[in-house]
Image (cartoon, rainbow, N blue to C red):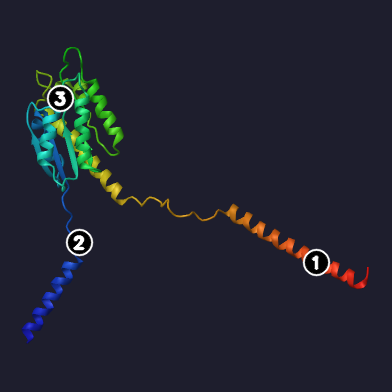
Amino acid sequence: MRWISGFGTVVATVLVLCLCAPAAQARPHVLVVGDSLEELTSPYLARYLPGVELTVNAVGGYNSYQIFDLFQESFDPSVDVVVFDAGTNDNPSYPEILAGNLEKVAETVGDRCMVVPTVHGFTVEGVDNTGKNRVVAEFAASRPGTQVPDWARTVATRPDLMQADNLHPIEEGADYRAQLIAQGVQGCLAYGEAVATAPPEPRTDVEPIATVGKLQAREEAVMGEIRSDVLRQAAASLLAGTLLTGG
């Protein structure tokens, strides 16, 4: 019996410790899809995103249609942030291609935060990537929290980070690019935490309490009605007394 009693004490102690211990928080889950740029970038991402679960699906030479297919293959409800690294292999004369695929991703992910790098690609028949980057900017403006690592600006200001083809980064450039995208992911995670802890929006379906001015006006109206009644009663009494005395 002593052994059973002691065992019960141990079990009770373990249960108390389990109840008191804080629940382990799940690691943030980030999905990254892209082309050859992402193939070069993704090996460095984990270095700058410790504690983050990364799923990477990237294939060299893919355009944004094909990268959207990669997204569909890999997306899972557990994903907290999506990095859609696309557009480099799209025809710059048709920026609406990238716009359409971004919108399809947005429809799928709902309120989840997205990271969408700006595009540096080849100029084709005199058309550069201005249109595609305008699409990225407009998309980000339409979705609060969207992060836009500015890869296009980096290439323009740091040509030393690029290979001879001026399309793919060298190792140092891939590392730098990973830092840009990691900053975007961290921005998304911070945004999501801020939204989750924000106070609720005030209800609009509740009749607001009357303002002081309205209460004062109502009080004055009531007092006016009381004064009128008192005057009417006084006048009636006076008239009755006059009739009785024959005045």
Reading the image, the residue beneath label 2 is 22
Residue drawn at 87 percent across, 71 percent down: 241
Which sits in the foreground, 238 or 188? Answer: 238
The residues bearing labels 2 and 1 have C-alpha atoms spaced at a distance of 76 Å
Residue drawn at 14 percent across, 21 percent down: 160
Disc number at residue 234? 1
> Pointer 3: residues within 10 angstroms few (<14), some, or many (20+)?
many
Quadrant hosting residue 148: top left
Query: Left of 244 or right of it: where is 27?
Result: left
Asked if residue 58 can be seen in this view, the reply is: yes
Do callouts 2 and 3 mark residues in contact (Cβ within 8 Å)? no
Reading the image, the residue beneath label 3 is 88
Which sits in the foreground, 173 or 99? Answer: 99
> Which circle, 1 or 3, is nearer the viewer?
1
Q: Quadrant of the N terminus?
A: bottom left
Q: Secondary structure at mark 1?
A: helix
In the rendered structure, which disc, 1 or 3, sits on the residue that comes first in sequence? 3
* Residue 84 sits above or below residue 246 on the image: above
Q: Secondary structure at mark 3?
A: loop
> Which amino acid type is marked by label 2?
Pro
> x%, y% of residue 198?
33, 50
In the rendered structure, which disc, 2 or 3, sits on the residue that comes first in sequence? 2
The residues bearing labels 1 and 3 have C-alpha atoms spaced at a distance of 92 Å
> Which amino acid type is marked by label 1?
Ala
How many badges with numbers are in the image? 3
In the rendered structure, which disc, 2 or 1, sits on the residue that comes first in sequence? 2
> Which amino acid type is marked by label 3?
Thr
> x%, y% of residue 131?
24, 21
Residue drawn at 7 percent across, 83 percent down: 4
